[in-house]
Structures are given as structure tokens and as C-alpha cells.
Amino acid sequence: MKRKQLTFRIRLLSAAIILVAIVLIGRLYQIQVIDSSLYLERAESQYVHTKSDLYSRGSILFTARDGATLSAASVQAGYVLAANPTQVTVENSKFCDSLSRYLDDPIEKCNERLDLPGRTYIELAKKVSEEDSDIIVDLDVDGAQLYKNQWRYYPGGSLAARSIGFVGYSNDGTELHGKYGLERQYDDVLFEKRQVMSVNFFAELFSNLGEFVYSKEDNNSGNIVTTLEPSVSRMLDSVLKETNDLYESKLTGAIIMDPKTGEIIAMNAVPGFDLNDRSEATIDQFQNPLVENLYEFGSTIKALTMAAGIDSGAITPQSTYYDAGAIELNGFTISNYDGRGRGTVPMQEVLNQSLNTGVSHIVKEMGKEKFRDYFLNFKLGSETGIDLPNEAFGLVDNLQAAGDVQYATASFGQGIAMTPIATTRALAALANGGKLVTPHLVKRIEYDNGRVKEMRYPEGAQVLSEETSEELSRMLSIVVDDALEGGDVALPNHSVGAKTGTAQIPDPVNGGYYEDKFLHSFFGYFPAFEPEFIVFMYTVEPQGVKYASETLTTPFMDITRFLINYYSIPPDR
């Protein structure tokens, strides 16, 4: 009897447990599936503030001359300023007026939002500094609330802006990713993926007034250390702006690079923009024209033609030709810049006086095929591999043409178009013993887990002999010593090799070239025979001047003197 009673009780208890389980499962289904939105709304109503996790992203660092790193892009801590309309004890207009200097939107917008019914949280400012937050606290405005926040911050403002780039929301509006420059190129390293966090009543009680509750996914993130030197970058930006303003140019840009390694010390273009306040900038200003835009650079390319002619054995520095001032090719006339003939001319004068007929003669002596091979080996139509997004290919189709005139115009930098960075790399081969280096801006990656990755870049092909490189350096130093502004800008203790370029700008509507629009370019390196730096500059459509020697000689020499003094480069003569 007792056994039957025990069995009955066990079965009754089991049935009760099963019944309760069924009820609980049904209730959970109702809560989690059928009424999920209702309970989610109730849960959210307990929260004072719900937003994405505190923003975090790896830093971009400048490298100073002494090896110290300085922030180019970091994360700044501060606060979100919000309002709880149910706690505001004064008129909305007075509330908004008392906080007006900190608001992201006009006071009228603040008033409108406070009047919206049923609101307990209105965000008024997303980036309130620590200093401003202290002032807001002292104001003791009922209904004003501050919540911890972090955001991307660029200490240099406009410094190297087109190279650094910035972040913006992804297409779905949920995550901040790099949009331009190094921010985009190294987004997979800089981006730190995090989950959502919230601050609620219980967190307020038990975690010291609003510490954030969140979880972070482990990822392979870190900081990038660049080759960009902050003082040099600031000097360059200043020189570019002064030059652009003086001649009212559409754009002025420059690259300062170590010709032996490809390390870029400074690179930017103006007009620029402030990375922390991009409201007035255009999309064109966000792009990096030194990497993304193509130009016909004109006579700076003559140095490459001269190098190809000497390296191929078609000419020597002592070779001469007869200059009649113009030549006829395929029904076209190619003239010197002044249309004047100079009789028998040595090769040095082709560079000194920038003679179109002279480099056309070199092409004739080399033959079109050999000239084409050299220019294609300079990779003027290829990407350089620089670690920046959207690098463009050059347009060098004229090097495949059947006619002679296309090769002649290419010899003085017209009819072919290249990026400034590809042109700088090719010209650097004149300085470094004939090698094509890989231009780059990042020297190492420092991961959050402590691992450090030193970046390695390919050395590149040997496109000229060391002897040719040395010979061109000698010839270009004579250009500075004797020809550039009559030798008045030559430095007494340091050799400098340089060449100017003045190019007509193509007319995309009517074809041909504008008669009154020019692009000026200038490159140089120093010391000429053991170069520490190569500088490439250009300015688009300068007003009131015709030749690059007028616009860019002084800025280039200012940059040269600064670098010699800043890096204590010893005299070489």
C-alpha cells in the first residue's frame, strides 16, 4: 500500500513539474517572441542613456626627428551633453540659452526638441571637452545631463590632412571606419570592434555613477607609426599655403621623401581642411591629389629623358646638336619655350635652358623603341605601391603610338600624364644610384597584444646605372649653380640638383592645350651626390606668372634650407 502511494506521489510530482515547465516555456515564448517589442520598450525605459560603446580606435603617430612619436590621430575623452525635459525647471528658451555655447545646433532647434512630448533624453552636443563639462556642472542647470563619450581627434588639425584622412560612418550607419588617407588604408588595424553597452539605473547604483557596462571582442588591432615628421610637415604646409595664396593657384602640393628608402617625410596639398571640423571642406579637398590625380608635368621630365639617353649610350654629356629653335614632326611644329634657335648646343645647356628641341634630339638618337622601354621601366604609368588608397595609374598611351611627334612631346613631359608620387619615385632614381624605391608612409604597426610589425618594402628594379645617376646629379647641380636664377640661389656649402617644369594644361572641351593656363613643377635633391631628401613641388594655374622658375624656386630653396638646418646635414663642398 505504501509503495502504491509513493508511486502515485512521484507521478503526481512529475506531472506537476512537467506542467510547470510547459507553463514556463509558454511564458518565455510569449515574452521573448510574441511580446518581445513590448518588454524591450519597458526595459529601455529603465535606461538613462543607451548608445554605442565608448568609441575606440588605434592611433596614428608621427615620428619626430629624434625618433619620438607624436599623435596624428587619437581618441579624445569627453562627454555627451543631453537634456531630460521632465527635469527642466525653467522655460525651454532660458534652458537652451544658458547652454548655447555648447550646443551642436542653434537655440531654436534646442527649443523645438525640448517641446517634443514623451521625451526623457535629448542629445544636445556630442563632443563636450573635460574643461567645458566642468563649467556646465558649475552652471547647475536642472535637466542638463553629462555622459562619458569618446571620439576621433586630430591634434594637428589640418596638418598632413590629405595623407592622414579621417573616419566616417559605414553605409549602414552603425560603425565608424576610415574614409580617406591612412585612416582608410589601415582601417583593418585601427578599427576596434566592440559590442553595445548601456548605462542603467542599476549600473548607476553599483558602478560609481555611470561606469559603462560593455564587452569587447578580441581583435588584431593596434597603432600605426608613420614616417611623417611633424615639424617638417608643419613647415611644408606653411610654405604650400603661402605659395598658393601668393599666386592664387587652384592647388599647390609637394612631397618630401628619402630617395634611398622611399620614406615620405612630409606630403600634402592646399587648399587644405581641418580634420576636426570638415563642415566647410569639399570632397575634392578630402582626396589626395598627390596620389589620385594625373598631370602633364612638362620640363621636369627632361631629366629622365637625359638620363635615358646617357644610360642607353645614345648620347654623352659632351654630345652636341644643332638647335634651329623648332623642328617639324608628322606635320606638327615643336619649338623651344621662346621659339629661339641657339646653334650648336651641348647637352648641359639642354637642361640649363630647358630646350624642347634638345630632348627631342635625344629621342631621335635613341630610337622610339628604346626611349619607350626606358620610360616604361620608370613605371610612370604604373602604381607605385604607396600605402594610401585610390592610387591612379598614369596615362602613357602615347608611348605606344606610331608617330614620332608623340615620343618627342613625351620627352618634355607633354602628352603623358602621371601622378606626383609616381613622378617623384622615377626622379628619385636619378638621386639614389638608379633604383625605383617604394614610397611609403608607415614604418611599423604596434599591435595591442604587444606584437610589433616592422614594415618592409621592396627595393625595386635597377632602372639606371650608378654611373648614369651620378652623371645626372652632376648635371642637375650645374643647373642650380649656373642657370637657376643665374646661380643666385645656389648654396655655398651644399650641392643641390634641381630642374623646373612649365607645362600647358590640356583643354578637355576643345582639345589641344590652353594658351593661358599652366602647371608649374619643380624637383630637386640634396646634397646632390649623397642625397638625404628629394622634394617635388607643383602648383596648378598660378596667376600673373608664366614659368615655374618664378613661382617655385623660392619655396623649394626655403624647404631646402630648413631641412639642411633641421637635420644638421653636413656640408659637401
Image (tube, rainbow, N blue to C red):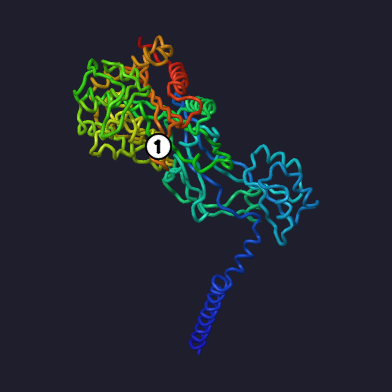
Horizontal arrangement in the rendering, residue 191 relative to residue 464 (left or right): right
Residue at the (23%, 38%) spot, across then down: 402
Could you say which quadrant of the image residue 518 lies in?
top left
Residue at the (50%, 42%) spot, across then down: 166
- Find disc 1 in the rendering and name its residue: 506
Vertical placement of residue 265 versus 281, above or below: above
Q: Can you give x and y, in whole percent of width and height, for residue 193 in the image?
A: 47, 50
Q: Can you give x and y, in whole percent of width and height, for residue 199 in the image?
A: 62, 53
Residue at the (46%, 21%) spot, across then down: 550
Q: Nearer the viewer, residue 226 or 540?
A: 540
**Which quadrant, please, contains the C terminus?**
top left
Horizontal arrangement in the rendering, residue 99 relative to residue 474 (left or right): right
Vertical placement of residue 25 versus 175, above or below: below
Q: Can you give x and y, in whole percent of width and height, for residue 16 in the image?
A: 54, 81
Q: Residue furthest right?
A: 90
Q: Is residue 277 visible?
A: yes
Could you say which quadrant of the image residue 453 lies in?
top left
Q: Nearer the viewer, residue 332 or 361?
A: 332
Q: Nearer the viewer, residue 420 or 324?
A: 324
Q: Is residue 450 visible?
A: no
Q: Residue furthest front?
A: 331
Q: Residues within 10 Å of mark 1 (few under 14, many from 20)?
A: some
Amino acid tagged 1: Pro
Helix or strand or loop: what does disc 1 sit on?
A: strand
